[in-house]
Image (cartoon, rainbow, N blue to C red):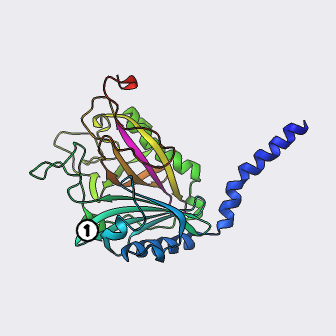
Amino acid sequence: MRFISTVLLGIAIAGGSTNVHAASQGCDRTCLSGLLDTYMNAVASHDPKQAPLIIGYRQTENAVAIPLGKGVWQSVTGLHAKPSKYLDPVQGEAFWFGVADEGKTPVVVMARIKVEDNEISEGEWYISRPGQAGMQGPVKADGSGAIFSDPANLEKNPPPVRNVAPGQRLKRNSLQGIANSYFDALTESNPELMQSHPDCFRVENGFLTAGRPLAAGSTDGYNGRSNCQSGLGTFNMSLVGDRRFLAVDEDQQVVVTSAIFLRNANGFQRRCVFFELFYIDRNRISQIYSVIYYPNPGVPVPNWGHYYGNWPLPANFGDAK
């Protein structure tokens, strides 16, 4: 009994250590927002010393690890006004979503920072640039096949900034479960699994992909427009893998996720990896915003988390058969 009590006490202490550590950070929404602004301005100023980065800070851009001071620290020349920010003091995560300039070229950006003890330990970026490879692979000579991207539309129609009344907020686990229903519906090609409103729309890299007028005679949508459930059987999807629920902005009732679309064996579409925002209203998904990247077949993504191998296998190898 003495041994069991000691073990249980040890488990209780270990189980509570995360909450104690989180509380010791003392970084609330205002703190996270300020650190996020400091970080993004430091990037635009090309000076990592302006941000409180830990020794051992790690950063990826479109899933590739980048040395400190390289990548966006050199390429970003400006930040457009009024970005969207998503803050999670419980997990110490903050997200910046908007348009930045690389030289004179506007690009759609979603960036994540991890805050621990009021310092930034991680930076993770997804960037949609003109001419990036699309679902079918490299862009063709005539310019076709590139990713959908529309920075101007994102600036004209940004996600809403809101503060949902406390009495109307769902708990964190409910918000995560509703967001996960979208991934389950895609994996199973079953719209009944998706907890979304009939007029739910989706914006990818600033480009409206769900919410557009339906083709003549099509009924796969709502009130003449496609919605978040449209076309579920056309994705060539084996699994929405490596699902990460990185932040829950309880005030805004938004869940920030990352995942990978893994294709069926011998499929011709590339995997995609992304950050994705789920706005939740009245217990269902109402709006989705994402920044998506289509990596080369041999690249490990997302290059975070448990580092699972998920790149395509040869058709004659093991589980790929």
255 drawn magenta: yes
Image coordinates of residue 36 in percent, x first then y, are 48, 70
Image coordinates of residue 113 in percent, x first then y, are 49, 63
Evaluate whether residue 211 shows in this view.
no
Of the 4 image quadrants, the one containing the C terminus is: top left
> Which quarter of the figure has residue 66?
bottom left
Secondary structure mostly seen in the magenta stretch: strand
Q: Is residue 156 left or right of residue 288?
A: left
Q: Is residue 101 left or right of residue 36?
A: left
Closer to us: 146 or 119: 119
40 drawn magenta: no
Q: Is residue 152 left or right of residue 13?
A: left
Q: Residue at x 52, y 56 (%)?
A: 247
Residue at numbered disc 1: 106
Image coordinates of residue 18 in percent, x first then y, are 67, 55
Closer to us: 128 or 55: 55
Closer to us: 210 or 139: 139
Q: Image height check: is 65 above or below 11?
A: below
Crowdedness of circle 1 by 10 Å Cα count: few (<14), some, many (20+)?
many
Q: Image height check: is 272 above or below 248?
A: above
Which stretch appears magenta?
A: 251-262
Farthest left residue?
142
User: Element at badge 1?
Assistant: strand
Q: Image height check: is 221 above or below 96?
A: above
Image coordinates of residue 266 in percent, x first then y, are 27, 29
Closer to us: 132 or 297: 297
Evaluate whether residue 136 shows in this view.
yes
Q: Residue at x 40, y 72 (%)?
A: 43
Of the 4 image quadrants, the one containing the N terminus is: top right
Q: Please, what is the three-letter code of the amino acid marked with disc 1?
A: Pro
